[in-house]
Image (cartoon, rainbow, N blue to C red):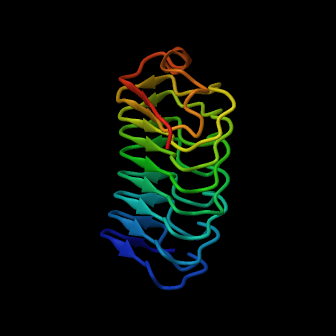
Amino acid sequence: MYNINGRFNCSNNYLESLKSAPSKVGGDFICTNNYLESLEGGPQYVGGIFLCDNNVLESLEGGPQYVGRNYNCKHNHELISLKGAPKKIFWFFDASYCNLKTLEDGPTWILKDFNVSKNPLEYLNSGIDYIGGDFLFSANNLKSLDGFPKIIDGDVFCYCSDPNKFSIMDIRRAGERMGNVYIWDR
């Protein structure tokens, strides 16, 4: 195991494993556009941005437990769970264009935006206490608003597959505090 103070970029290398990656990266860690099914063997600490988008990840288990900036795992079409994601995100979290049906086991505190758009979400079950920016969850199949984030300091964007399913008031009642709520069909 070794550490790197700066940035580590292993993108576009046809990697199937992070087995030889550093265990701690002081800057950004970028492993996008590979064939990774797992984050096992990768760093547990990333001081900057963590990008693992455009892989074939099935879960976030084995990934970093501390990320100092953005955590981006979008476009992982096999990703069905946020299990393994850090509980605190110190900037943006983007898990859009995956295959998530619930937000269970995901982050509970996000400093900026939380984007889970274009997922077949059926249930939130998020356990999210705080989102400091916007909450985006478009093109979903939600059956319930149970587990809606408690506090959202930004706005809520819900481009629902069925815009008549939940009203703005339904969404406002689901959380304790939020900015504006926008609902429309895709």
Choose between 95 and 136: the one closer to the eye: 136
* Displayed quadrant of residue 132: top left
Give x and y (percent) for residue 136: 45, 39
The answer to whether residue 93 is left or right of residue 170 is left
Q: Is residue 66 left or right of residue 62?
A: left
Question: Camera-side residue: 125 or 29?
Answer: 125
Q: Nearer the viewer, residue 63 or 185?
A: 185
Task: Residue at 54% x, 80% y: name it.
Answer: 20
In the figure, 183 relative to 174: above or below?
below
- 112 displayed left or right of 80: left
Q: At 60% across and 30% down in the image, what residue appears? A: 127
Residue drawn at (54%, 50%), measured in percent from left and top? 118
Q: Position of residue 94 (x, y in %)?
A: 46, 51
Q: What is the x, y in percent for residue 50?
A: 42, 60
Q: Quadrant of residue 134?
A: top left
Q: Residue at x 54, y 56 (%)?
A: 97
Which percent across, then down, holds residue 74?
50, 58
Q: Is residue 27 left or right of residue 121?
A: left
